Amino acid sequence: MKIKFLGAAKSVTGSMHILECKEKKILIDCGLFQGRRDESNSKNRNFPFDPRSLERVVLSHAHMDHSGNLPNLVKNGYQNSIYSTFATRDLCVVMLKDSAHIQEKDAEYLNKEKTRQGLPSIEPLYDMNDVERSLSLFRGIGYRKGFYVTAEVKLTFFDAGHILGSALSIFDISENGKNVRLAYIVDLGRKNMPILKDPERIDNIDFMIIESTYGNRLHDDLPCTDEKLAKVVNDTISKGGKIIVPAFSLDRTQDIVYCLNRLQDARKIPRIKVFVDSPLSVNVTEIFKLHPECFDEETNQIIASNENPFGLKDIRYITDVEESKKLNHFNEPCIIISASGMCESGRILHHLKNNIEDPKNTIMVVGFMAKDTLGRKIVERQERVKIFGEEYRLRARVEVLDAFSAHADRKELLEYVNQTKNSLKGVFVVHGEEEQSQALADGIKDLGIQNVIVPDLGQEVTI
């Protein structure tokens, strides 16, 4: 049995790994790499393997850095099944279509400037036809329902508590008379977060592939974050400004709306107009309502009492482009939540362009921003940033609320490893910038587990 690490090794985006058993290759995740435009374009277009050589694809969850390159995989010849949970399958229907739409629109916008400069035009990574072909290959599997993806490999999904439908992928592998249990713990959610159930505990793991996004960092407690959120809202309102929230359409937007609803009910913030400016967020919120099997007890009780946990008195979900443009001229204090979460594409770029230079406004960051993304530059409070190729001064206030992150922090990751350390023969640390991955690896070794590897991109390990 071999594992080859082809994405999110000593980095955060572009998750992609190959599990090989009896010469049959299973691709685990097929995510988009996000960062510098030219580097991202090259990595996303060129697979380091022949897609036609794959036996199966297993998808852990619907975030774009895990699922977003599936249509390109199919475009390049993959024709077999893609296994995911039912909620992940439903989310990918809207998310992959939205990805193709954004790529087409961004290419159209950028090509206007390239034509003016006499430069070659660019093409989207994939189109809607590629998305439709990839969606036809999805096969839904319920949590805790073991399923043989090949004759030697049994796959079981457990709830990761990360986003709606996210799964801890457990591979029970039989090869040459030996049985091995491999756990893919990428990404791992957190306990006691709103809406979703806590991550499930898995025992008797032989080898683990684990994320390290926050491998050397700790989150604030959620009650403290509620207070911080209230303070950001109240301070910005007092200045007559807007709060711009770059947020993933999946999970993060729903979490923010849920918490704003709670703060308004507790009268910790005043009624304020909230705009969710993302067609994808609207569609994702509707899919949330279809999957109560993923909700925690508190959320299901709210739904049972005929309340909408994703509704606010003054919330408005925007899908129309012209309605989105009108927000540029909206002069009252308000909250604008828009995708994408790392500020690399989509409508958030237009809202940042129109609001980033006004010191009355606040840019509120509620999730991880990968290296070299516009979101990271804002978090670092760089004096000048480029949006659509033009330079803008960062004069708006920047507030970072990491506790909204759906990723486990260092303490939570180490606790998860520790609960099964007696059976562990090896741990592979991925999905984190190098210093975060190495710090987590050192922490795991301190638990008494010595076979801990932070793989390089392209490294292959034989088990």
Image (cartoon, rainbow, N blue to C red):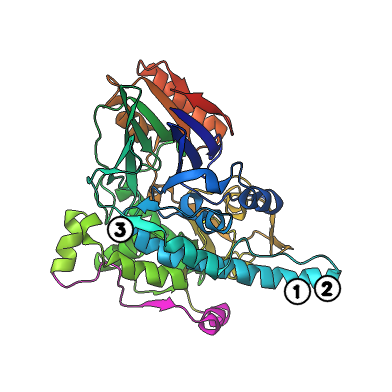
Magenta span has 316?
yes
- In this rendering, is residue 38 above or below 323? above
Amino acid at circle 3: Phe
Question: Residue 331, percent across and down?
Answer: 53, 80
- Element carrying mark 2: helix
- Quadrant position of residue 109: bottom right
Q: Which mark is residue 86?
A: 3
Q: Residue at x 17, y 61 (%)?
A: 300
State the residue position of label 1. 112
Give whichever of 89, 174 is nearer the camera. 174
- Report which residue position mark 2 lands on: 116
Which of 307/427 is in front?
427
Q: Position of residue 21 (x, y in %)?
A: 42, 32
* Quadrant holding the C terminus: top left
Tag in front: 2 or 3: 3
Q: Inspect the magenta stretch and tell me whether residue 97 lies in it.
A: no
Left or right position of 328 against 154: right
